[in-house]
Image (spheres, rainbow, N blue to C red):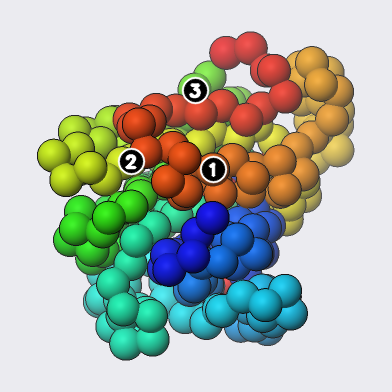
Amino acid sequence: MLEDQTCLVTGGSRGIGRAVAEELGRNGADVAINYRSSEAAAEATAEAVREEGGNAITVQADISDYEQVEAMRETVTAEFGPLDVLVNNAGITIDKKFENMTKNDWDRVIDVNLGGAFNCTHCFFEDIKSAENGRLINISSVVGQQGNYGQANYATTKSGLFGFTRTLALELASEGSTANCIAPGFVETDMLETVPERVQEKILRRIPLNRFARPEDVSGIVRFVASPDSSYMTGQVIAVNGGMEW
Ligand code: NAP
């Protein structure tokens, strides 16, 4: 389904990004797996892709640093040629009630979640634009749709991705490339582990399907959006949240 496609997954070492990298590789794409510090986990993801017959490399870069992203582009291009599919997945949380949130807590989350999406998209924009099956896929969150107590910084970045996606959908459309956002609900990854158990229980009561998502619940949707099957869909926010109201 993704033969001859080159994909970059930011934050592909763990969690949702790892599942996405494996899914894209399994479906024939060449996959570049970005990480910030978890080298061994990124290598394990690449190895998992290779074990299933796929082609993968790992590439270290802090996506909040434009120069590091430029260097990442050079590595990916040298190995695989121009990019077809960018999955802006890497993200962080620094959760605090707003009154306790420092300027640094605010800036860091904005710099990684929104600044990182800008940096990666900017560096690969021409590739995506000129690709036959160019795809920009931004991983947002249900929290961007409904807000969440203690996540003013994070929710702002995840809402920001909606406007970013819709605007770039317009700017890519003349070339037939697309931009879409996926907004997962709460997914069983290290990120969810940081949420206190009593809060997790509260969240669970709001999920009609009565379970948290598994990374694979998201990666299958990413595979569809990355594929030519989604070519008439652009500027959309796809909720994958177990039926949570917002
Ligand atoms: P995770 O398990 O905490 O993994 C985060 C990934 O992002 C890791 O691969 C990490 O790399 C990478 N990363 C963090 N900062 C980075 C930076 N500055 N530069 C490059 N890579 C960086 O997170 P996750 O739960 O899979 O979440 C993935 C995405 O889905 C995020 O955008 C998150 O907001 C979104 N999301 C998650 C949930 C959820 O409930 N888990 C729900 C909705 C949306 P290292 O391993 O090197 O640190």
Residue occupying image coordinates x 13% and y 39%: 174
Within-10-Å neighbours for mark 1: few <14, some 14–19, many 20+: some
> On the rendered structure, is 41 left or right of 9?
right
Q: Are marks 2 and 1 in contact (CB under 8 Å)?
A: no
Q: Nearer the viewer, residue 18 or 117?
A: 18
Query: Mark 1 is on which residue type?
Result: Phe
Residue occupying image coordinates x 81% and y 21%: 209
Q: Secondary structure at mark 2?
A: strand
Disc on the earlier residue, 3 or 2 = 3
Q: In the drawing, what numbered circle is on residue 145?
A: 3
- The image quadrant that residue 6 belongs to is bottom left
Q: Nearer the viewer, mark 3 or mark 1?
A: 1
How far apart are labels 3 and 2 at the CA level?
A: 18 Å
Query: Mark 2 is on which residue type?
Result: Ala
Where is residue 103 shown, x and y percent of the image?
A: 38, 47
Q: What residue would you read off at disc 2?
A: 179
**Quadrant where the C terminus is found in the figure:** top right
How far apart are labels 2 and 1 at the CA level?
A: 13 Å
Disc on the earlier residue, 3 or 1 = 3
Q: What residue would you read off at disc 1?
A: 224
Disc on the earlier residue, 2 or 1 = 2
Residue occupying image coordinates x 69% and y 18%: 243
Query: Mark 3 is on which residue type?
Result: Gln
In the rendered image, is residue 71 in sight?
no
Where is residue 226 shown, x and y percent of the image?
A: 46, 49
Residue occupying image coordinates x 25% and y 36%: 169
State yes or no: Cβ of the residue under disc 3 lies below 8 Å from any atom of ligand 1.
no
